[in-house]
């Protein structure tokens, strides 16, 4: 008997298959948990893939110390609610040197507090496979990356040396020190993510919903003044505006959008007419010197 699957059911089945493939083939996998909407979907899929058991791997959060306060509160709340093994890693050298997005810029901050921190954590725990929530529709370098993305012992990604993935057959072989980044959401779109969150009633960070928030217009973006570490430039003022976020990262590098979408249904409605990428809200993607492909070659997510 043939059962016709919906579009979301096919995507879900593919992602669950990928989770189980990694659990069977690798000795020490981990899931990178950035706390955003994609991570929330990824976590939900991981829980489904191994139900009624818990996922057979820990969840790793690379804390730059500049995440939105609501993200950190949500992270801790979900870890307690679901009971998964949460690892939090901070680059202590970066903290010692006071690396921050204001004094050092987005490129240096991202490299030290995200990329280097991630490499440190993967080496520290000896993980040989790391799940991430990247999607091919987000950005052009991610569009050409494989679902199973090979990294050498230095965590370097070489886009010219990728493995074929015909017929959903994945090459999981690696030598000692090498690793694989795995992207179960590769074939999902932003709209798919939101429709799935709505369908499955997946909890997400409240920052995704429209609300009056204190923001500053800076470099063509609306930046939420999330704490007192953000100093105003001459001529800048803090205004309360009805905004929400399409993407989340370090708060000084993430722009809000003006919106009145305060429900999942309203967000899905917005996505049906959206004509720009969510990554336009990330200041790190506007820095040509720190392009996404360059970051990924250095070991970024």
Image (cartoon, rainbow, N blue to C red):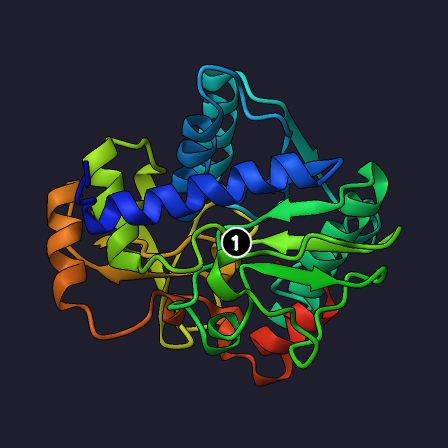
Q: Is residue 81 above or below residue 226?
A: above
Q: Residue at 45% of width from left, 46% of height from top?
A: 226
Q: Residue at 18% of width from left, 60% of height from top?
A: 271
Q: Which residue is mark 1?
A: 183
Residue 103 vs residue 191, the one in the foreground: 191
Q: Position of residue 261 (x, y in %)?
A: 14, 50
Q: Is residue 267 above or below residue 187?
A: above
Q: Position of residue 277 (x, y in %)?
A: 33, 71
Q: Taking 94 as reference, is 105 left or right?
A: left
Q: Residue at 82% of width from left, 40% of height from top?
A: 126
Residue 277 vs residue 105, the one in the foreground: 277
Tell me, yes or no, if residue 209 can be seen here: no
Q: Taking 203 as reference, is 93 left or right?
A: right
Residue furthest to the front in view is 1
| Quarter of the view holding residue 29 | top right
Tell me, yes or no, if residue 295 can be seen here: yes
SS state under label 1: loop
Q: Is residue 31 above or below residue 109?
A: above
Q: Is residue 32 above or below residue 147?
A: above
- Is the N terminus in the top left, top right, bottom left or bottom right quadrant? top left
| Quarter of the view holding residue 186 | bottom left
Residue 89 vs residue 51, the one in the foreground: 51
Q: Residue at 40% of width from left, 32% of height from top?
A: 44
Residue furthest to the right in view is 176
Callout 1: 10 Å neighbours few (<14), some, many (20+)?
Answer: many
Residue 136 vs residue 221, the one in the foreground: 136
Total numbered labels = 1
Q: Position of residue 120 (x, y in %)?
A: 81, 49
């Amino acid at each position: 008997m043939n059962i016709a699957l919906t579009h979301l059911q096919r995507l879900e089945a593919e992602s669950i298959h990928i989770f189980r493939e990694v659990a069977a083939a690798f000795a020490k996998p981990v899931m990178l948990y950035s706390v955003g909407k994609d991570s929330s979907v990824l976590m939900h899929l991981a829980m489904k893939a191994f139900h009624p058991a818990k996922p057979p791997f820990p969840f790793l959060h690379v804390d730059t110390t500049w995440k939105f306060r609501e993200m950190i509160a949500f992270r801790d709340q979900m870890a307690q609610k679901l009971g998964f093994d949460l690892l939090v890693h901070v680059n202590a050298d970066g903290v010692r040197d006071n690396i921050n997005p204001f004094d050092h810029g987005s490129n240096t901050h991202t490299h030290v507090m995200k990329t280097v921190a991630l490499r440190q954590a993967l080496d520290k725990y000896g993980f040989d496979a790391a799940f991430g929530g990247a999607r091919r529709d987000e950005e052009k370098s991610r569009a050409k990356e494989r679902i199973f993305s090979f990294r050498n012992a230095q965590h370097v990604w070489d886009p010219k040396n990728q493995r074929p993935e015909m017929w959903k057959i994945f090459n999981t072989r690696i030598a000692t020190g090498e690793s694989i980044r795995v992207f179960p959401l590769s074939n999902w779109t932003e709209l798919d993510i939101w429709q799935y969150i709505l369908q499955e009633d997946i909890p997400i960070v409240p920052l995704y919903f429209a609300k009056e928030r204190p923001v500053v217009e800076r470099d063509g973006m609306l930046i939420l003044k999330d704490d007192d570490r953000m100093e105003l430039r001459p001529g800048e003022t803090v205004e309360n505006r009805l905004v929400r976020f399409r993407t989340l990262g370090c708060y000084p590098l993430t722009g809000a959008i003006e919106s009145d979408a305060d429900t999942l249904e309203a967000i899905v409605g917005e996505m049906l007419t959206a004509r720009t990428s969510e990554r336009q809200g990330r200041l790190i993607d506007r820095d040509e010197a720190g392009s996404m492909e360059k970051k990924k070659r250095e070991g970024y997510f």
